[in-house]
Image: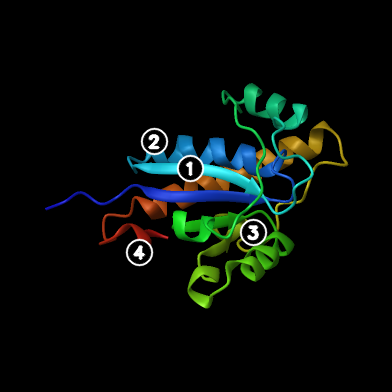
Amino acid sequence: MTPPAPLRVLALCLGNICRSPVAEALLRRELAAAGVEAVVDSAGTGDWHVGRPADPRSIDVARRHGLRLNGKARQLLRRDFADYDVILAMDSQNAAEARALAGTPGAASRVRLMRDFDPIAPGADVPDPYMGGKAGFESMFEMLERSAKEFARQAAAPEAEAQADRI
């Protein structure tokens, strides 16, 4: 029997410098801890920050929680819908923009909200902390951490027969 292919997950926010890089790092950590082989990346719906590192406030909150953000911002591309099993959007606007880019209903169905997996507020948006202060970034981290843990728990569920059925 061939082992299942790695689960491919893309975290998505507006500019790929605040929420999605932190979500990427958390998803990578939690999926590994759950024993789920995965490829995790992040992107933004906009192109304003392409090639730049994460926002220093995201880097700081991640560092304080033992994570490193080393990636560079990139924009969501139509090919991402073929390359990833699930695209976890940080808010409903990001999700709508991603679904519009998807091109087909099947591809659009890969888009979920990150907080669909938050046991405290399923389906809520992860507020963009960009215009705020340190407290907003800490709150963002807490939401993303809860969501990443639950996503990983579901992805590792023993009753799942295939990677796509895990989420």
Determine whether the residue tagged by mark 2 lies in a helix, strand or loop: helix
- Residue type at mark 2: give it: Ala
**Alpha carbon separation for disc pair 3 and 4:** 23 Å
Residue 119 visible in the picture: no
Mark 3 or 1: in front is: 1
- Residue type at mark 1: give it: Val
Relative vertical location of residue 43 with respect to residue 141 in this rendering, above or below: below
The residue that label 2 is drawn on is: 33
Is mark 3 in CB contact (under 8 Å) with mark 1? Answer: no
**11 or 106, nearer to the observer:** 106
**Pointer 4 local density, CA inside 10 Å: few below 14, some 14–19, many at least 20:** few
The residue that label 4 is drawn on is: 165
- Residue type at mark 4: give it: Asp
Relative vertical location of residue 4 with respect to residue 19 in this rendering, above or below: below
**Alpha carbon separation for disc pair 3 and 1:** 23 Å
Sequence-wise first label, 4 or 1: 1
**Alpha carbon separation for disc pair 2 and 3:** 23 Å
The residue that label 3 is drawn on is: 121
Determine whether the residue tagged by mark 1 lies in a helix, strand or loop: strand
Mark 4 or 1: in front is: 1
In the picture as drawn, the residue positioned furthest to the bottom comes out as 105
